[in-house]
Amino acid sequence: MRKRLVVMAVVLVGIAIIGYGPPTATAAPEAPATTDRVCADVRLDARLPAPPDGMTTQQAITVDENCAVHAGAVRLVPAPSTRERNGDRRLRVWSQMYDCCGILMNALYATHTWSTADGRISRVDTSVDTDWNREPWGGGWYPAQSWQAGGCDRPCPTARLEQHAEFGYRGIFDVTGTWYHNTHHLGVVLTDDEAAACELGVTARHWFVGWTWIRGCG
């Protein structure tokens, strides 16, 4: 399933933001029979540098059976130019959670396009996508809530933009619908000609060993 929301961010909106601390994971208490290898209350965050034009920055994160977090190398991957023909800049940020079989469970994507004039941001457009996996018999992941905030009073020297999405699960691995809940959070600060960095965070109520978090910027 995919849901898209397109907005023009022009007015700064104040909103409470979830704070992401250092990577932590604790062993889970009584797990369902089908989830005997899980870690509870996993909260991870990262700042990925905005890559040069024609590249993306990507990183994979896993959690082992001892609930220790393992961060893969930050990779620069070739990609199409982020500069539009009219001179506008484009930046895409994404957060994806995959299961142990490589199936995408849920994800949050944001694409920002902005124009500049006289060294200041004159326009910002943001497109937001979410993905979630459904099971053939009607169960699976589903969107619980989402929001976004940020922008600038045009023109402005910088614009901070944030996106947030939460996903619940009820299906073959948990019929109660209370065990799994994933939250994705994206943030970026845009300037007149570049993005300083991409901020990404994920929280999992229970993290099954074998899941992989893929985060990217570019």
Image: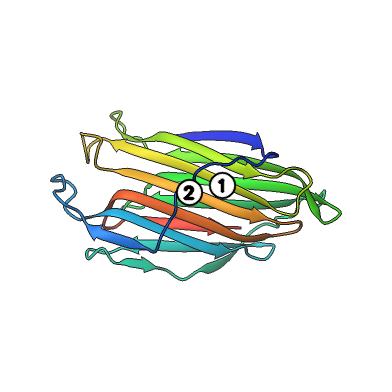
Q: Secondary structure at mark 2?
A: strand
Figure coloring? rainbow
The residue lying at 20 percent from left, 54 percent from top is 28
**x, y percent for residue 186:** 52, 50
Res 162 label: 1
Q: Quadrant of the N terminus?
A: top left
Residue 147 in the image: above or below residue 61: above
Along the line of sight, the residue nearer the viewer: 141 or 153: 153
Residue type at tag 2: His
Neighbour tally class for label 1: few under 14, some 14-19, many 20 plus, Cα within 10 Å: many
Residue 195 in the image: above or below residue 179: below
Disc 2: which residue: 185
The residue lying at 60 percent from left, 51 percent from top is 92
Residue 136 in the image: above or below residue 165: above
Along the line of sight, the residue nearer the viewer: 125 or 140: 125
Res 190 label: none
Picture mark count = 2
* Residue contact at pointers 1 and 2, CB within 8 angstroms: yes
Sequence-wise, the earlier of marks 1 and 2 is: 1
Q: Quadrant of the C terminus?
A: bottom right
Q: Quick check: 198 left or right of 40?
A: right
Furthest-bottom residue in this view: 73
Q: Quick check: 90 left or right of 105?
A: right
The residue lying at 57 percent from left, 58 percent from top is 198
Along the line of sight, the residue nearer the viewer: 148 or 142: 148
